[in-house]
Amino acid sequence: MQMKTGVEQSIYAMLLLTFLPDKGVLPGEFISQQLGASPTYFQKLLRKLVHADLLMSVPGAKGGFRLKASPEQISVFDVYEAIEGKQSLYASSGVFEDLMGIQNQNICLLSDLMTEAEQSWQSTLKRETIDSIRREIYLNCPPDHLTKLQSLIEEKMIRN
């Protein structure tokens, strides 16, 4: 299993938005530039996050994006699900049934194991929030880098 870069970019985009004051928005182009993402591809990610009610889109010349809920309320799993969808990570292809010649018996030895592993993985992602990751930024990043990022965001931010 390999997660698409869209999930990672979306989580970091949301982290950038945590630096905004109330009523502030950041243009999508600025966010995509900061993350090194293609603007057209990144617009698709932003639309998915808006559709999932994680971001608010403010239209117009003074428009942009901001978090729709507080960072404490948005789990990493919410972001993952918004970008990747709700499908299960594992779906039996019927290899075992074909191997054993037991088609139409609905036996898959891996289903329970994969379901348990997926539930454990989801539980971890649901436990972590955008805010918990943001706190890690403050613990692990040099203060001068955070100050520089905050200044850049304030420069590019649009107040509504």
Image (tube, rainbow, N blue to C red):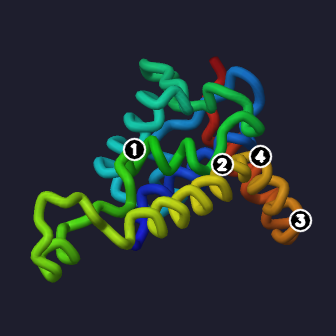
Tag 4 secondary structure:
helix
Q: Quadrant of the C terminus?
A: top right
Mark 4 burial class by Cα count in 10 Å: few <14, some 14-19, many 20+: some
Alpha carbon separation for disc pair 3 and 1? 32 Å
Residue type at mark 3 is Leu
Residue shown at the point (35%, 49%) measured from the top left? 87
Q: Nearer the viewer, mark 2 or mark 4?
A: 2
Mark 3 burial class by Cα count in 10 Å: few <14, some 14-19, many 20+: few
Q: Nearer the viewer, mark 3 or mark 1?
A: 1
The answer to whether 90 is drawn above or below residue 81 in the figure is: below
Residue type at mark 1 is Lys
Residue 143's spot in the image, x, y percent? 89, 65
Q: Nearer the viewer, mark 3 or mark 4?
A: 4
Is the Cβ of the residue at disc 1 closer than 8 Å to that at disc 4? no
Q: Quadrant of the N terminus?
A: bottom left
Is the Cβ of the residue at disc 3 closer than 8 Å to that at disc 2? no
Is the Cβ of the residue at disc 3 closer than 8 Å to that at disc 1? no
Residue at which label 1 appears: 86
Is the Cβ of the residue at disc 2 closer than 8 Å to that at disc 1? no
Residue at which label 3 appears: 139
**Mark nearer the N terminus (3 vs 4):** 4
Residue type at mark 2 is Lys
**Mark nearer the N terminus (2 vs 1):** 1
**Mark nearer the N terminus (2 vs 4):** 2
Tag 3 secondary structure:
helix
Asked whether residue 73 is in view, the answer is: yes
Q: Nearer the viewer, mark 1 or mark 4?
A: 1
The answer to whether 40 is drawn above or below residue 33 in the figure is: above
> Left or right: 91 with respect to 72?
left
Residue at which label 4 appears: 131
